[in-house]
Image: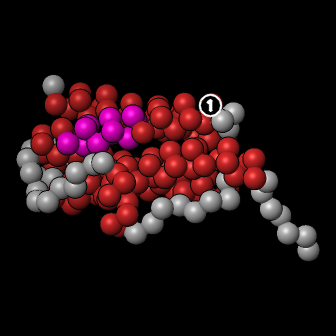
Amino acid sequence: MPTITKSAASATKASPVVASLNTALASSYALMANTHYAHWNVEGSGFFSLHAAFQSQYEALFEAVDEIAERIRALDHYAIGGLRNLADKAGIEEFSHPVAAKDFIAALIVGHEKVVADLITLRDTAEAAKDLETQDVAIGRIQWHQKTVWMLKSVLK
């Protein structure tokens, strides 16, 4: 069976895209962990709706993290791994203890906005590299996070 190799040109071309994918992967993973933590520890009068919303969000984030990591593998590179490596690259502060529901929501909004910024960088990097498939992944993720930010902000009003 022949060995499939990537050309030097395609490897060089993919590197900035892969770096941006790994950044988006790390920040998405951190946001997923924070959302799961909020799901476990939210309290108060809005418990049931927030508990369910956070579950839906962390499950969607788990699928997104997998999609991003698999895109990296499709480009013949390796996804970043290890909790310390992910945390170092994420740029999202983790929860260290339970907080009031409104504070969970506010912190998750900040996390989603950080992920959106990383995804915009990914989208633009992929566009410059003419990698439409990665650009498509980024655009879909941006839309989901922007919608989630709108919903979370609406809860705080």
The residue beneath circle 1 is: 127
State whether residue 97 appears in this view: yes
Asked if residue 32 shows in the view, the reply is no
Q: Which residues are magenta?
A: 107-117
Q: Residue at x 75, y 47 (%)?
A: 9
Q: Give percent across and percent down for residue 62.
A: 44, 56
Q: Label 1, secondary structure: give it.
A: helix
**Which is more toward the observer, 105 or 17?**
17
Q: Does the segment drawn in magenta span residue 114? A: yes
Where in the figure is residue 101, as x and y percent of width and height? 12, 45
Q: Is residue 133 above or below residue 15?
A: above
The quadrant the N terminus occupies is bottom right
In this orientation, which residue lies closer to the viewer: 105 or 52?
Answer: 105
Q: Residue at x 17, y 46 (%)?
A: 104
Residue 26: where, in percent of width, then height?
Answer: 40, 54
Residue neighbourhood size for the residue with mark 1, other residues' Cα within 10 Å, grouped as few (<14), some (14–19), many (≥20): some
Secondary structure mostly taken by the magenta-highlighted segment of the chain? helix
